[in-house]
Image (tube, coloured by chain):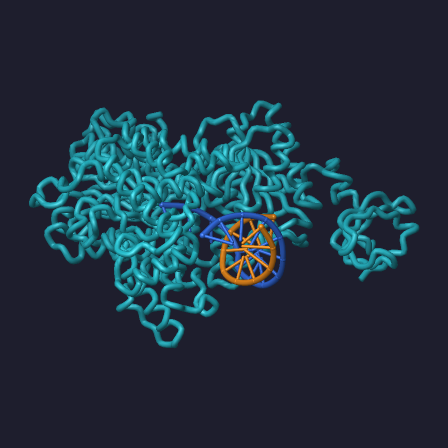
Chain colours: A cyan, B blue, C orange
DNA sequence: ATTAGTGGTGTTTTT
DNA sequence: CACCACTAAT
């Protein structure tokens, strides 16, 4: 390995000789990687292409810094975007070091902000038990708010307000700072202010609030700011291209003028603009901090030549780039395989067939990934896989902590921690049914609104009369009892108690589809036990949070609540695994977004159709298509050796059949890299692959609208045979599918 | 008060 | 299709 460095002309002056211990971890790096890892204590930007060893450089740098005594674990803050990436980082750093990584801050932006806010909740103006809202919770809070203010949901859809609020928070703007000129935005801004007040009353924060609040805390509080600045001399950021304005501002605040920010990113893989990420950060960072220390990593160690060439060609269609081309010495490899399916089911059948044949060639299922643009597309694929009995694993969609029954249980737990949590209160007041319906809840909401108190207080002060009142009183008793008993219990015991005593278990027991739900509740107890035992790997080391600070908040308060709060925060921030777990013997299904950072021997990209990928909604957005193209770039670069691209002419979507043309991205890949796949697939139903279609000139083509004298209007779904034998499958608007012989049927093109 | 049923509507990606 | 909000019936 060493000769390789020399061959590339590595200049030995830097470190290998000086730091003998670390030479083994450095020896395997290429010259650019080595240069990045061993940079002096300055801010730097590492532009690292897909598969160029980005995370490796980052983690090796941390290990190197520590091993060479330039910093202690305590002085390192490493932040990324997803939980999976954070965990990965921690694992890899730990593997390289012989000393404990405790005391090192590694996590997501949200996780780290949460940690800081917990430690200094009083300075941040939050209750000790503050809870975190996920987007679902946030939306229901907004709906409740709009209702209580009698705002017309037609004119102000909750979704729009949610976007408005999050967008402004991500930009670092409180209501007072929002510039609103027209009536509509003015009203939205007012509602934003009301929303924040409501959150304050309930003691809850949304995702963006975690960041904004933390930023404000550090801005306002000089002692804390200088404390953390003194502490974190090395700040490392992974996936820098995905940081939002606010996250960037937070980093700058933390870095001050003396600390170094080591930012690793790839502008070509920026796919989170929709959530406030701003590639502008990269440009700005380079100007402000990196002044010159920019290193590009362009050697790709993952994909074979033609795959890489396709990815490069595609991304060249984007205009806004820093400019960077990947290369490999891994050889040309195979061409990409394109399959045009007739229907989505046909596409699934094709993929299934290829998966099987790959498996028989010895490619493990876990080394194959099936990617799509949106979660809804997994249905058809799952259907086919399920019927074939092929093991598969779907990531995304409904996550564990987002399931209805789990959320119900969590709501009870939140009420144990803080009964003023209106969201949780409203959610489970009548689950299971206690005879307290809409009306009673509405009454309570009115009372709470008038008096400016929480639902809980409103309910305690004057419970409704009659049967509903009994239910409310029962509910209050229940919560009081749980709160009492919780004092003596461990976290998993408390969770078990809540599930039983609340009646949730009984409720699902009597439901038809309740089996799985009860299993999930059991699983929640397990999750609590696991959390209790290990704590959250990424939020542990509570110990060293505020060393050297005037004794204030850190250790104050009820330790029991700390465990519960920690668990609830964990549930909100991690929502359950969502990113792939390596090594499982199953075909991996996921969106392109969640595939980022992963790699597989074989990758299938399905649904490459206009309207789907690129998605319709992106076409109207500024730079929307460029972002979609970057997404496609991410998808392509997941593959090591084999890459399939497929699209279908017709697809069931939102309950109706759509006719799609092939994605523009297919055309943007040079022809010579593409090979046809699966020419004669006997496919689902009576469908036949499009390559059996007689001639291009024939009016009888798939997708053609036709009229039949008896069946009326319809559309051709498949064509089979030629000449006098030709038959077509037509989907009639009124009577559904019919197979017709062209020679006899009096079919007319419409 | 609760439930079942209806009709209208909107849909990307994630911490 | 799936989720909602609303209505009618229990």
- Residue at 59 percent across and 55 percent down: it is A611
Quick one: which residue is furthest to the front in this view? Answer: A466
| Residue A60 lies in quadrant | top left
Which image quarter holds the N terminus of chain A? top left
Query: Could you tell me how many numbered marks the image carries?
Result: 0
Residue A579 appears at what percent x and percent y?
Answer: 43, 38
Image: A649 above or below A24:
below
- Residue at 49 percent across and 43 percent down: it is A397
- Residue at 61 percent across and 32 percent down: it is A386
Residue A630 appears at what percent x and percent y?
Answer: 48, 50
Give left or right: position of A200 versus A159: left
Image: A614 above or below A46:
below
Q: A356 and A544: which one is in front?
A: A544
- Residue at 38 percent across and 76 percent down: it is A183
Q: A595 and A375: which one is in front?
A: A375
Quick one: which residue is furthest to the bottom in this view? Answer: A182
Q: Is residue A65 visible?
A: no
Give left or right: position of A737 versus A220: right
Image: A43 above or below A157:
above
Residue A537 appears at what percent x and percent y?
Answer: 28, 33
Which image quarter holds the C terminus of chain A? bottom right
Residue A638 appears at what percent x and percent y?
Answer: 49, 39
Q: Is residue A106 visible?
A: yes
Q: A390 and A465: which one is in front?
A: A465
Image: A180 above or below A743:
below
| Residue A296 lies in quadrant | top left
Give left or right: position of A610 versus A709: left
Q: A601 and A509: which one is in front?
A: A509
């Amino acid at each position: 390995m060493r000769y390789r460095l020399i061959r590339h002309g590595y200049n030995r002056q830097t470190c290998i000789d000086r730091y003998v211990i670390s030479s083994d971890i450095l020896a395997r790096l290429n010259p650019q990687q080595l240069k990045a890892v061993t940079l002096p204590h300055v801010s730097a930007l590492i532009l690292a292409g897909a598969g160029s060893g980005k995370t490796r450089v980052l983690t090796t740098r941390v290990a190197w810094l520590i091993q060479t005594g330039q910093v202690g674990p305590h002085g390192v803050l490493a932040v990324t975007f997803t939980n999976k990436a954070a965990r990965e980082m921690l694992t890899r750093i730990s593997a390289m070091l012989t000393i404990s990584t405790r005391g090192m801050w590694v996590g997501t932006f949200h996780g780290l902000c949460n940690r800081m806010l917990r430690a200094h909740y009083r300075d941040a103006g939050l209750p000790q038990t503050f809870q975190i809202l996920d987007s679902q919770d946030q939306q229901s809070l907004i709906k409740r708010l709009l209702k209580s203010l009698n705002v017309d949901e037609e004119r102000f859809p909750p979704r729009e307000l949610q976007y408005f609020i999050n967008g402004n928070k991500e930009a670092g703007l409180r209501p007072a700072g929002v510039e609103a000129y027209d009536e509509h935005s003015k009203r939205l801004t007012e509602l934003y202010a009301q929303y924040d007040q409501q959150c304050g009353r309930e003691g809850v924060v949304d995702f963006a609030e975690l960041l904004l609040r933390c930023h404000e805390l550090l801005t306002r509080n000089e002692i804390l700011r200088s404390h953390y600045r003194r502490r974190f001399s090395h700040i490392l950021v992974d996936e820098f291209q995905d940081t939002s304005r606010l996250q960037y501002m937070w980093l700058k605040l933390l870095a001050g003028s003396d600390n170094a920010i080591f930012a690793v990113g790839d502008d070509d893989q920026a796919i989170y603009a929709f959530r406030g990420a701003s590639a502008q950060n990269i440009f700005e960072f380079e100007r402000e901090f990196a002044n010159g220390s920019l290193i590009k990593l362009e050697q790709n160690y993952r994909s074979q030549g033609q795959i890489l060439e396709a990815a490069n060609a595609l991304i060249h269609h984007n205009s806004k780039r820093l400019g960077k081309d990947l290369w490999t010495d891994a050889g040309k490899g195979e061409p990409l395989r394109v399959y045009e399916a007739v229907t989505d089911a046909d596409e699934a059948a094709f993929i299934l067939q290829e998966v099987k044949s790959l498996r028989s060639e010895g490619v493990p299922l876990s080394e194959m990934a099936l990617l799509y643009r949106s979660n809804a597309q997994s249905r058809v694929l799952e259907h086919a896989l399920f019927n074939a009995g092929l093991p598969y694993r779907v990531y995304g969609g409904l996550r564990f902590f987002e399931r209805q029954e789990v959320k119900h249980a969590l709501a009870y737990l939140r009420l144990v921690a803080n009964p003023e949590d209106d969201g949780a209160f409203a959610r489970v007041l009548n689950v299971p049914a206690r005879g307290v319906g809409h009306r009673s809840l509405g009454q309570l909401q009115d009372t709470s609104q008038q008096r400016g108190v929480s639902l809980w207080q409103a309910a305690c002060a004057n419970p409704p009369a009659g049967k509903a009142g009994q239910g409310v009183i029962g509910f209050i008793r229940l919560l009081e009892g749980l709160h009492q008993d919780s004092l003596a219990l461990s976290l998993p015991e408390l969770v078990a108690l809540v599930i039983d005593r609340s009646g949730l278990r009984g409720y699902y027991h009597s439901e038809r589809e309740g089996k799985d739900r009860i299993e999930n509740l059991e699983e929640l107890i397990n999750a609590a036990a696991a959390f209790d035992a290990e704590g959250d790997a990424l939020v542990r080391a509570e110990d060293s949070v505020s060393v050297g600070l005037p004794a204030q908040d850190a250790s104050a308060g009820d330790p029991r609540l700390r465990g519960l709060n920690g668990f609830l925060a964990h549930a909100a921030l991690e929502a359950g695994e969502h990113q792939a777990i390596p090594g499982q013997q199953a075909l991996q299904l996921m969106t392109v977004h969640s595939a980022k950072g992963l790699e597989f021997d074989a990758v299938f990209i399905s649904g490459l159709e206009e309207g789907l990928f690129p998605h319709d909604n992106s076409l109207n957005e500024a730079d929307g298509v460029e972002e979609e193209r970057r997404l496609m770039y991410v998808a392509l670069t997941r593959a090591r050796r084999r890459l399939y691209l497929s699209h279908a002419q017709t697809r069931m979507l939102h309950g109706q059949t759509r006719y799609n043309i092939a994605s523009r991205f297919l055309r943007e890949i040079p022809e010579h890299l593409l090979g046809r796949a699966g020419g004669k697939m006997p496919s689902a139903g009576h469908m036949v692959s499009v390559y059996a279609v007689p001639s291009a000139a024939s009016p009888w083509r798939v997708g053609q609208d036709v009229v039949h004298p008896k069946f009326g209007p319809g559309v051709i779904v498949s064509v089979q045979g030629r000449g006098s034998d030709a038959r077509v499958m037509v989907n009639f608007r009124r009577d559904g599918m019919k197979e017709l012989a062209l020679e006899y049927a009096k079919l007319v093109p419409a």
